[in-house]
Amino acid sequence: MAFTLQIGEKAPDFSLPSTTGKTYTLADFAEHPVLVVAFTCNHCPFVKESDEAIRQLVERFGPEGVGFAFINSNSANTYEEDSFDNMVERMKEHRFPWIYLHDASQEVAAAYGALRTPHYYVFDRERKLVYTGRAMDNPRQPEQSTSKDLERALSELLRGEPVSTSLTNPVGCNVKWDGKEAHWMPPEACDLVPPKE
């Protein structure tokens, strides 16, 4: 069985607290014809340096009906900066235009098969997976990115077109699994797109 959710599979449900104090489930995003679920965190440089590019993307596609659920599954025992209290402070400071959820048990990260921070999943109206992977090929220098994969996938989906590239490898730090050393990944986790021979 593949570690990461496969194209065409349904979004696993969740019930997670947000930085606003409200608990969200998958059903809370039912009004959105398209939903982006992103695994992210507070400390990762790949996340922090692409924040403003992602803000622009959310501000562009949010008014078109796309929902955005960002989830921090990182263990605060590995990086204290990734604690829930620091999530709240981060949202207060930056006022990001997305819902920021805390997966303290890491069960949601395991259900989705999150590999890295950030790792993006795009679901259609039926909540079937149509794209997973990176937002762009150079998240640490977004202005130098030559492939804006998440933007392309959302644009195609909203035009009623099939997503032309449904799989890319997420680019970032690995998810910090509780009780494991900082760079550990589950043995069954692997690249979504195998390296070329």
Image (cartoon, helix red, strand yellow):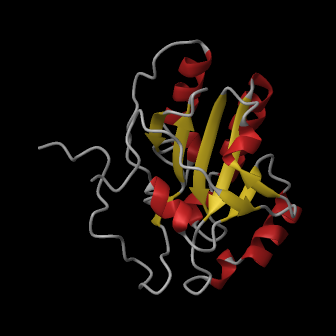
Of residue 115 and residue 26, the one placed in the foreground of this image is: 26
| Quarter of the figure with the C terminus | top left
Please state the horizontal and vertical placement of residue 161, each as a whole percent of the image: 50, 13
Point out residue 57 in the picture as x, y percentages from the top left corner. 69, 36
Q: Residue 152 location, x and y as percent? A: 53, 26
- Residue closest to the far top: 160
Task: Tell me what residue is drawn at x 68 percent, y 79 percent.
Answer: 81
Seen in the picture, residue 128 relative to 88 is either above or below; the reply is above
Among the 4 quarters of the image, the one containing residue 167: top left
**Residue at screen point 41% across, 32% down:** 8
Locate residue 83: give its quadrant.
bottom right
Q: Is residue 190 left or right of residue 161?
A: left
**As rendered, which of 153 and 67 lies closer to the eye?**
67
Q: Is residue 125 left or right of residue 100?
A: left
Q: Is residue 8 above or below residue 174?
A: above
User: Residue at position x 75%, y 26% from top?
Assistant: 65
Left or right of 130 on screen, residue 74:
right
125 versus 160 height, above or below: below
Q: Is 67 situated above or below 18?
A: above
Give percent across and percent down for residue 74: 57, 72
- Which is nearer the eye, 143 or 90? 90
Q: How many marks?
A: 0
At 87% across and 64% down in the image, what residue appears? 21
Asked if residue 148 can be seen in this view, the reply is no
Asked whether residue 128 appears in the rendered view, the answer is: yes
